[in-house]
Structures are given as structure tokens and as C-alpha cells.
Image (cartoon, helix red, strand yellow):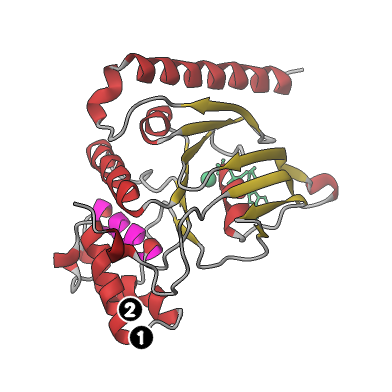
Amino acid sequence: MLDVLKFKNPRKESSEGKGRIAIDEVSITFGSGADKHVAVETTSIGIEAGEFVCILGPSGCGKSTLLNAIAGYVKPTTGKVDVDDVTVEKPGPDRGMVFQQYSLLPWKTVYENVAFGPKMAGFSRANSGSTANTFLELVGLKKFGSRYPAELSGGMQQRVGIARALANYPSVLLMDEPFGALDAQTRLMMQESLLDIWRKFGTTVVFVTHDVDEAVFLADRVLIMSAAPGRIIEDVKINLPRPRSTDMASDPEYVRARQFCLDTIKAESRRAFEGQNT
Ligand code: ADP
Ligand code: MG
């Protein structure tokens, strides 16, 4: 039975219904003059609190840039991103980030890595410690708290990365190709594990990937981005029941959604390719 109280935010804010994202007429341009590059073309999209959304698109289309705008690492050139009606100006503890590279502090133990955020946020030592243990347990790594990151497999390190992000009690979890460096088998296990963690913790997730199967398996909605300059060209609802398991690959809804995504990407690549040749 799920112990919801375990995840009660010690900052004492209610996280109920939090994590709503509004991307409003956002465009992002890098450089100027001859070096000017439009990474994200004017895009508007809404994401509900607690939704699991995947952003799917080819390499270089602007996925990370759009995610970084939600995180507050990149400022939109036009438009704005609101999270729970507050315009994003900089990174904040309400938005946790998990990158492809595990980016753990190598000189700190697993436990210290997870306790670090709460400690920085001013939690007491006892509170940081119990928070770290709660989230290490959530990702199934409580036993490994005293290990150093280098002593863990890639999949385990990435689970520590997820625990570390969640330990700040974010209302939004932003994930940039988090399983891209893992082997296929580990990746499947991590996808199931992430859905389990999400079901228990209930945060909004925005997950970037270029892998169609990964997107369809995980998401409530798949937002497909065009080739550069990136904009969202499809918003695909995935009507698969939850909890999901990897044997759903033969479910007709899975097959339909997957084929639709593949066809969209193929048509888009053709359009981009022909555009380059005219
Ligand atoms: P994706 O994550 O979809 O692979 P990115 O968002 O990383 O794509 O990049 C989109 C485009 O914007 C790429 O052409 C990339 O080179 C460019 N870009 C990303 N960040 C910067 C930056 N800080 N300065 C200049 N160009 C950038
Ligand atoms: Mg990227």
C-alpha cells in the first residue's frame, strides 16, 4: 500500500495539483547575424499537473533547448514559460532535472548525493537524511547508500540521479534522454521502474527522447517536434492503460500510436530533407 505521507514535502507546501506548465508563444534563437540559429520556433503547449509527457524528435531539433527553457537554464527569445502561473526566470527547486550523463558528485557517497539538495535547501540534518533514505528506497537503492557513484552500474547511477532530483520535492521532473547511455535491457527495466516511481510520487514529468518506443511506452501524451527549427507538430494521446508493462508492445493501441509517430517523423524528415535540397 502506498504511503503517501512518506512523500510529504518538509517545506510544508501542498504539492497537490502542482506542476502545471504553460509554454506560451516561446521561440528561442541563438547567436545573431550570419550565426543566427532558430532552435525553437514559436511554440505554445499546455501540460497538466501530474501528466507524463514525452517530447519526441530527431537529434538537433531543439528538444533540450525547450526543456532547458522550462528548467530556467535558457531564456526564451520571445514568449514565456509559466509553471503554476509563475513565469520561469531561473532554475528552482520546483523543477528537478535528470540528464543523460549521470552528473552525480563522484567524491560523495550515494546517500550524500541525494541528501545534498535538501541540505542546501536548509533542511535539518535529520530531515535531509530521512529524505535521502525515503527516495533511495523509492528507487530501490537504500542498501547502496554508502557506495560511491563509480561503484554502481549506469542504470543504478541513473536511479540515484532520479532520487536526487526528487529529494527536492519538485512539482515537475524534467528528464533529458536520461536512459540514452544505457544498454537496451537496462533501458527497458529503467522505463518500467520510472513509471512505478512516477505512480508513487505523482509529479509532472517532461521526458525528452528520440526513441519512438520509449515515448509511446511511457507517455500520456507524445509531443512530436519537427526537424530544425523545432516546433511541436503533433500532440499524440496514448490511450494505453496503466500500470504499463513492456509486453504491451503488441497491444493494438501501442501499435497504432507507434506507427502514427513513425509516419509523422518520416514525413517530417522527408520535408526537411527536400527543403535542404531546393
Ligand atoms: P536536441 O536536444 O533536439 O538534440 P538541442 O536543443 O540541443 O537539440 O539543439 C537545437 C539546436 O540549437 C542545435 O542546432 C544546437 O546546435 C543549437 N544550440 C543549442 N544550444 C545552443 C547554444 N547554447 N548556443 C548556440 N546554439 C545552440
Ligand atoms: Mg538534446
Residue 175 percent across, percent down from the top left: 45, 50
SS assignment at label 2: helix
**For mark 2, does the 10 Å Cα neighbourhood hold few (<14), some (14 to 19), or many (20 or more) residues?**
many
Q: Is residue 277 magenta?
A: no
Circles 2, 1 touching at the beta carbon (< 8 Å) = yes
**194 or 60, which is in the foreground?**
194
SS assignment at label 1: loop
The residue pinned by badge 1 equals 124
Q: Is residue 84 above or below residue 28?
A: below
**For mark 1, does the 10 Å Cα neighbourhood hold few (<14), some (14 to 19), or many (20 or more) residues?**
few
The residue pinned by badge 2 equals 128
**5 or 117, which is in the foreground?**
5
Residue 66 percent across, percent down from the top left: 61, 47
Answer with left or right where residue 46 lies relative to residue 244.
right
Instruction: Identify residue type, mark 2.
Output: Ser
Residue 174 percent across, percent down from the top left: 48, 52
Q: Residue furthest right?
A: 33
Q: Examine the residues drawn in magenta and state their main secondary structure.
A: helix
Q: Report if residue 47 is visible in the image.
A: yes
Instruction: Identify residue type, mark 1.
Output: Ser
**Measuring 70% from the left and 57% from the top, which residue is drawn there?**
75
Q: Residue furthest left?
A: 143
**38 or 274, which is in the foreground?**
38
Q: Report if residue 108 is visible in the image.
A: no
Q: Is residue 162 magenta?
A: yes
Q: Which segment did they paint magenta? A: 155-165
**Measuring 36% from the left and 20% from the top, which residue is drawn there?**
254
Answer with left or right where residue 243 lies relative to residue 146.
right
